[in-house]
Image: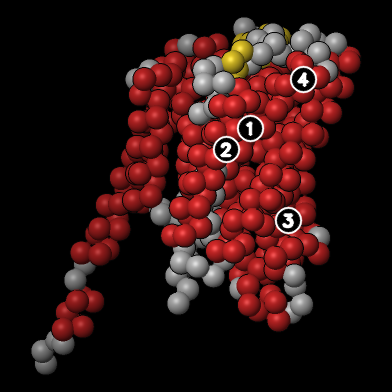
Amino acid sequence: MSQTAIEAAEARPSLAVGALLERGTGYLLLLAVAAFAVWHLVATPAAFFTTLVVGINQGALYALIALGYTLVYGIIELINFSHGDLFMLASVLSGFLMVSAFGATAATTGAFLALIATLVLAMIFGAALNTTAERVAYRRLRRAPKLAPLITAVGLSFVYQWGGIKSNGSGQRNWDTILGSSGFTVLNVKVPWSMIVVTAVTVPLLLGLNWVIQKTRQGKAMRATAQDQDAARLMGIDVDRTISLTFALGGAMAGAAGLLYLQTFGTTRYDAGFQLGLIAFTAAVLGGIGNLNGAVLGGVLIGLVQALNDRFGLGVAYSQTVVFTILILLMVFKPEGILGKPTTEKV
């Protein structure tokens, strides 16, 4: 009895072989990266661990910005390209508050109190500005084709950059910081205070966000809105308020990242949000966009990859090339990201 066309197609082993090849290639890439890291760990352990510290410091900053991207996308599936420039405005505001308003230019008790106050104010600023953007621009386009809010986000990004030029100038501006490059040494590995502060802020914020989303009434409303906005309305959920809260939380993360970036690098630029925002969005996609833990994981991984490449690999000039090459390879083998789950398009 002859096979039907469907039976013949199912009998072909090409799909299984192709999947095996893809999986094998992915494992080979991971093995190559692991071998690269182990080789440098054995050859120069002090330099290797110092590089890891730098990578974790950078990655935590990327993670804070990526949290804002992944929060908004998880609720309304909007890639908020203005989020990086919101972070830039928060960094400029932090500089004015810390140096001009509080006069905190050295590590004193008063300066650390000013740091805490500036952190709160920067988070409030980011939350307020992001919520205003949602209310004025994005809410009116909620039923529009997806391209409309995307273009609006790009336009809003240029508006934020204009604000950055007016407040910060068109060039790089240097600020005195209370952390600077100082730190302490453990087994010939220098650990900067900025890494301790960045980690001490990022971890509680991530835990707090997870608690809000998983344990609180508003968190349940956010998860319901992400699944189906119309069904959420029928259940009595204020969808507009829920989305505004999501934008507020994302903006607060950008505000915190702005202050920590300023204290880590001591510089601000009106166009800094473009590059860091793009890297943070890449981190969100790498970890699995819509997943909070994935955003943090993606940010830390990108920070580590950049640091290892800058120190032992192709150099700073090829840093972005290496990061996006890794992203492309991951999208080929695991399109949903490291911690993301496969989804189907709603129709």
**Mark 1 Cα-neighbour bin, 10 Å: few <14, some 14–19, many ≥20:** many
Instruction: Work out whether mark 1 precedes mark 2 in sequence or the reverse, and give the earlier one.
Output: 1
Q: Position of residue 252 (x, y in %)?
A: 71, 42
Instruction: Work out whether mark 4 precedes mark 1 in sequence or the reverse, and give the earlier one.
Output: 1
Q: Amino acid at mark 1?
A: Leu
Cβ–Cβ under 8 Å for marks 4 and 1: no
Count of labels shown?
A: 4
Residue 72's place in the image compared with 111, above or below, is: below
**Marks 2, 3: nearer the viewer:** 2
Identify residue for label 4: 98
Residues at marks 2 and 4, CA–CA distance in whole angstroms = 21 Å
| Camera sees residue 73 | yes
Q: Give the residue drawn at x 65%, y 22%.
A: 262
Q: Amino acid at mark 2?
A: Tyr
Residues at marks 2 and 3, CA–CA distance in whole angstroms = 21 Å
Cβ–Cβ under 8 Å for marks 1 and 2: yes
Cβ–Cβ under 8 Å for marks 2 and 3: no
11 relative to 228 in the view: left or right: left
Residues at marks 1 and 2, CA–CA distance in whole angstroms = 7 Å
Q: Secondary structure at mark 1?
A: helix
Instruction: Work out whether mark 3 precedes mark 1 in sequence or the reverse, and give the earlier one.
Output: 1
The quarter of the picture where residue 265 lies is: top right
Identify residue for label 3: 245
Identify residue for label 1: 89
Instruction: Work out whether mark 2 precedes mark 4 in sequence or the reverse, and give the earlier one.
Output: 4
Residue 311's place in the image compared with 288, above or below, is: above
Labelled disc at residue 160: 2
Q: Position of residue 271 (x, y in %)?
A: 50, 28
